[in-house]
Image (cartoon, rainbow, N blue to C red):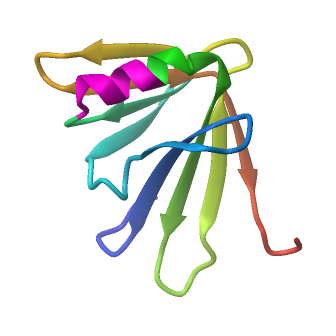
Amino acid sequence: MMTASSQAHLYIKHAVGSRMLFDVSGDGKPFTLEEASAGWTFQIEDVDSATAALLEENAQDLNLFYFIQQPGEPIQKAWFYDKDRPRIEYDAGNRRCTLHVDSRMAYSNEKV
């Protein structure tokens, strides 16, 4: 659960080589994550058309990394992906990009 002092981060990377395609939180883009009937939906605001096109071109190989930082707590980490191909929708008029994925895996780097 997000609190006023929590911070959420979203990074979208290419599966091969882990190349950063879109540092959503680093670029200061507002986003939401919602559980859906067939997985999870990320909605990212203020996305330019070039970034949306880059995500679509690499859709088959997208990895989404979601972190929640809460003061005094270990970082909660989750990897989101799609077993086949994420569904990506881009609303150019509202500059909104929506990604739908079907898989999630929580993970930690504490024992690495």
Q: Position of residue 43 (x, y in %)?
A: 34, 31
Task: Point out the stretch of residues depicted in magenta.
Answer: 47-54
The residue positioned 25% from the left and 33% from the top of the image is: 47
The residue positioned 88% from the left and 74% from the top of the image is: 111
60 horizontally vs 70: left or right: right
Q: Is residue 99 above or below residue 69?
A: above
Q: Is residue 77 visible?
A: yes
- Closer-to-camera residue (21/75): 21
The residue positioned 38% from the left and 47% from the top of the image is: 24
The residue positioned 26% from the left and 47% from the top of the image is: 30
Q: Quadrant of residue 108?
A: bottom right
In the image, residue 52 lies in the stretch drawn in magenta: yes
Identity of the residue furthest to the right in this view: 111
- Closer-to-camera residue (25/108): 25
Q: Quadrant of residue 94?
A: top left
Of the 4 image quadrants, the one containing the C terminus is bottom right
Identity of the residue furthest to the bottom in this view: 72
Q: Position of residue 44 (x, y in %)?
A: 31, 35
Q: Is residue 99 visible?
A: no
In the image, residue 37 lies in the stretch drawn in magenta: no
Q: Position of residue 57 (x, y in %)?
A: 51, 16
70 horizontally vs 102: left or right: left
109 horizontally vs 61: left or right: right
Q: Position of residue 64 (x, y in %)?
A: 58, 40
Overall secondary structure of the magenta stretch? helix
